[in-house]
Structure formats: C-alpha cells, structure tokens
Image (cartoon, grey):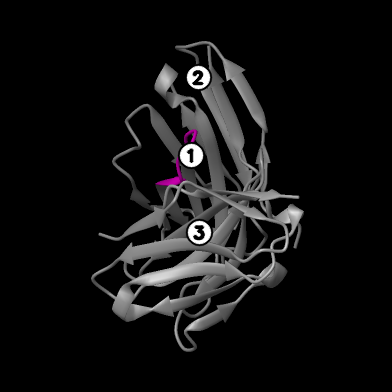
Amino acid sequence: DTGVSQDPRHKITKRGQNVTFRCDPISEHNRLYWYRQTLGQGPEFLTYFQNEAQLEKSRLLSDRFSAERPKGSFSTLEIQRTEQGDSAMYLCASSSTGFGNQPQHFGDGTRLSIL
Amino acid sequence: AQSVTQLGSHVSVSEGALVLLRCNYSSSVPPYLFWYVQYPNQGLQLLLKYTTGATLVKGINGFEAEFKKSETSFHLTKPSAHMSDAAEYFCAVSVGGSNYKLTFGKGTLLTVNP
C-alpha cells in the first residue's frame, strides 16, 4: 500500500491557461474521488469514478473542468481557461468497493495558484 | 442532502487537557460518519469512522468519538492533548446511494499550548 499519489504538488499558472493534474490511487481501489478545498473550508466533492466510469459530477464542475480515468487506473483532472476562482487545493481520494462504506484515502493534493 | 456543522472554527487547549471537537450532522437516512485530520500542506488522514454497530468508536492517536442518533452528533474527544495533535480536524458524512461521496464540515483548527 503505497498510498494515493498526486502530481504536481504545486502549480502556478497565469489566468487563462490550461492545467492538468494527475492522481494515482491505491492499487486495486475501484473508487476514485476528486475534491476541491479552498482556504478555511472543508473539501467539496467534484466528481466520482468507479473503475473507468465517471458516475457523478458536482454542479461545482463547470464545463471548463474535465476528468478522466482511462482503464480504471490513474485519473486526470483538467481545467481549461483557468480563472482566479480556481485557486484551491485539489484532492484525490480512493477507496475499495468492499461491503458498506469503505474509508477514503487521500493524497497530499495539488495546490493551484492562479496569477 | 446531507450536511455537517462543526461548532467552533478554532479550539485552543493546554497540553495534557481534554480535547473536545463538536460535530452535528443532518441526514434523512442512516449516515456513515468520519473524522479526518489535516496537517499543513498535506492531505486528509482518517482518524476514525462510524458505520454501524457500536456507537463509541476508537481511532488512532488516542482519539474516540460517540455517535448519538438522538442528538445527531458525533463529537471527537481525546483525554489528554499532545503538542503533535495541533492540526485541522474535519467531520464528514456520507450515505449509501450517493456513491459514498463525503460531505465535510468547515473544519476546526486545534491549537495546543505548552
């Protein structure tokens, strides 16, 4: 169990640029979640994958956001035409699909700063 | 929809004192409840979880929480605070049928004074 890995840890970009983050979940974890955390707030749900299928998207996920999980392994989150309001910590979490509600394991996040 | 309210955005205790962090939830169906801890510039680490069964749940680092359905509460306690406990603590709820996504409270920053 090597834990959830996220890359990069920090990203600084100019407004209007596109950015892509990567998440490598714990191996054999079928469920993968993306959350966004702004300063002084708890994480907010963005989207959920079970294997390669994206089963739920939050209303927070505007059309500038897209997420993929090809082959049900790693996942990417892309933000197009970044805006100041996109500045936040983006967290990825994974869990297994055992009986009941399995705990989610979080990565250390990618901190996005928009200049 | 589910929601979580954490009472007190900042709690300060002395080293060795009791830690009590408050969490109230709202859910129309039986909830699953979690406490996570976050250190600066890191992700969230699971402290403990309540799913079903025993209402008093023990977690890591000496923390425990009690699920009280009648009070819709899930307060986190630790008998004796340690300097290393200083961090941000988040209470979260999820329910079956919602893809088990977590709904978090706004967090409580715990400071421990020597």
Subunit ID for the residue under disc 3: A
Which residue is label 2 attached to? A18
Subunit ID for the residue under disc 1: A
**Which of marks 1 and 2 precedes in the sequence?**
2
x and y percent of residue B58 in the render? 61, 78
How dense is the environment of label 3, judged by Cα within 10 Å: few (below 14), some, or many (20 and up)? Answer: some
Residue type highlighted by circle 1: Gln
Give the distance between the C-alpha atoms of the residues marked 1 and 3, in whole angstroms.
24 Å
Determine whether the residue tagged by mark 1 lies in a helix, strand or loop: strand
Residue type highlighted by circle 3: Asn
Which residue is label 3 attached to? A51
From the image, state whether disc 1 or disc 3 is nearer to you: 1
User: In which quarter of the view is residue B13 placed?
Assistant: bottom right
The residue lying toward the viewer, choosing from B59 and B96, is: B59
Relative to B18, say whether A33 is above or below: above
Bounds of the magenta segment: A38-45
Residue at the image point whose x is 35% and y is 69% from the top: B95
Which residue is label 1 attached to? A37
